[in-house]
Amino acid sequence: MKSIEGGFPEYAKFEPTAPGRDYYDPDNFKDELENIWFDTWLLAGREEEIPNRGDYKTVQIGNENFVLTRGIDGNVNGFYNVCRHRGSRLCTKESGHFSQGRIICPYHSWMYSADTGELSKAPNISDDDEGFNPENHALVDIKVESWDGFLWINANPDSPTLSECFNLPESWSIYEKYEMERLKVGKTGTYKVNANWKLLMDNAEECYHCGTIHPELSKSTPPMQPRQWVDEEVPETKVLKHVGSMGLNPGFERCNIDGNAYRPVFPSLSDEDARKISYLHIFPHAYLCMASDYVFAASIFPIAPDYTIVKGYWLFDPDELEKDDAYLQDAIEFWDITCQEDWAACELAQQGNESRSYQNGGTLTPIDWRVANFKKYIKNEMNNN
Ligand code: FES
Ligand SMILES: [Fe+2]
């Protein structure tokens, strides 16, 4: 195990933030969607949100909307939520079920196979009609992959696999002990934040703010403690960031709102692991907070330059969820409060980033070194595409 002295590495230094404009300019936002969001693997939810054939959920990113649905072969397929006739949105709900595996457009009733996206029927139009070949009008698909129960999407048809992009085999093994494929969603949350998406990730990349805005989190895991890297052999990849573990306050048995143990520790964790919470961040938009008896996952989605939606997932041992007296509130409240504290701070930052006095931006301190890394990632993605 390797820890970082004082919580940040030697190369951390003072440097400028991105200019304020990057956090509100509509053209920059559009460029980010094209160069980052529609060209990378994104955490779009959990397998168990759509357990059966025909179940679907939708994902909004900027003005695009995607539908994820489980096909007859059990795999999850992803499509742009756009009818090929005259462009109507197909599913208007956030989630639901396609009866008999059919997606029917609400405008003129074109019908698609939810299993393949193929156009199966267009009312009053025959396959023999000159100039019309149903094969040319299938829904436009996107890539979908599953990773330990999490669903990932990628709108770039030429993208390498998730495993290739994430360098998964060696990177992920260190978290196998949390057995995330086995865990199930006990609670979801949706947060609407009036701030640019990057401010939310910037915020997630530092705990400099923890002492100021997170009294509950700070009580459970004191801020500014050196974070242990999970293993020095594990490389950080372009998108996977092993943020490390924080130790519990001596009076706490669990990383939650009051420190009490309401559920057993995950079976594969050591006594040492049980007294920690470990963090895995995935650029550009997600992080996993792995406590000893639950996992909280947050997935951040840009909607407009100054508006972002965050989906939160609380994952628990399925055996615990089945209990009549299952108690989850300690974990739910802990991250619900912490999220709200974070998003309120991001909204304040948004207001300042839009000020004419902030057009050249501000300062990243050495303690903000992970924010600096995120800034570098954004810059590279924007320049390389
Ligand atoms: S727009 Fe969908 S059927 Fe016409
Ligand atoms: Fe925070």
Image (tube, rainbow, N blue to C red):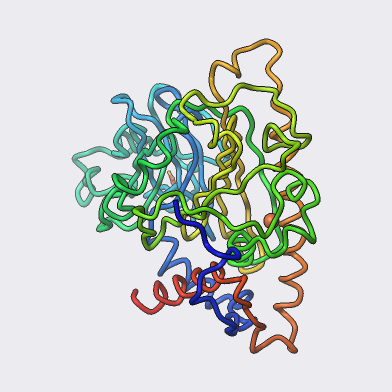
Residue 3 locus on image (x, y percent) = 51, 57
368 to 122, vertically: above or below: below
Q: Quadrant of residue 379?
A: bottom left
* Residue 243 relative to residue 158: left or right: right
314 to 130, vertically: above or below: above
Q: Quadrant of residue 381?
A: bottom left
Residue 118 locus on image (x, y percent) = 29, 39
Q: Depth check: give the residue in front, 267 or 56.
A: 267
Q: Residue at x 60, y 75 (%)?
A: 366
Q: Depth check: give the residue in front, 193 or 99.
A: 193
Residue 380 locus on image (x, y percent) = 40, 75
265 to 302, vertically: above or below: above
Residue 27 locus on image (x, y percent) = 53, 78
Residue farthest to the top, as pictured = 324
Q: Residue at x 72, y 56 (%)?
A: 342
* Residue 206 relative to residue 340: left or right: left
- Numbered marks: total: 0
Q: Quadrant of the C terminus?
A: bottom left
Q: Quadrant of residue 53?
A: top left
* Residue 57 relative to residue 171: left or right: right
Q: Residue at x 41, y 59 (%)?
A: 239
Q: Depth check: give the residue in front, 211 or 213.
A: 211
Q: Residue at x 49, y 50 (%)?
A: 280
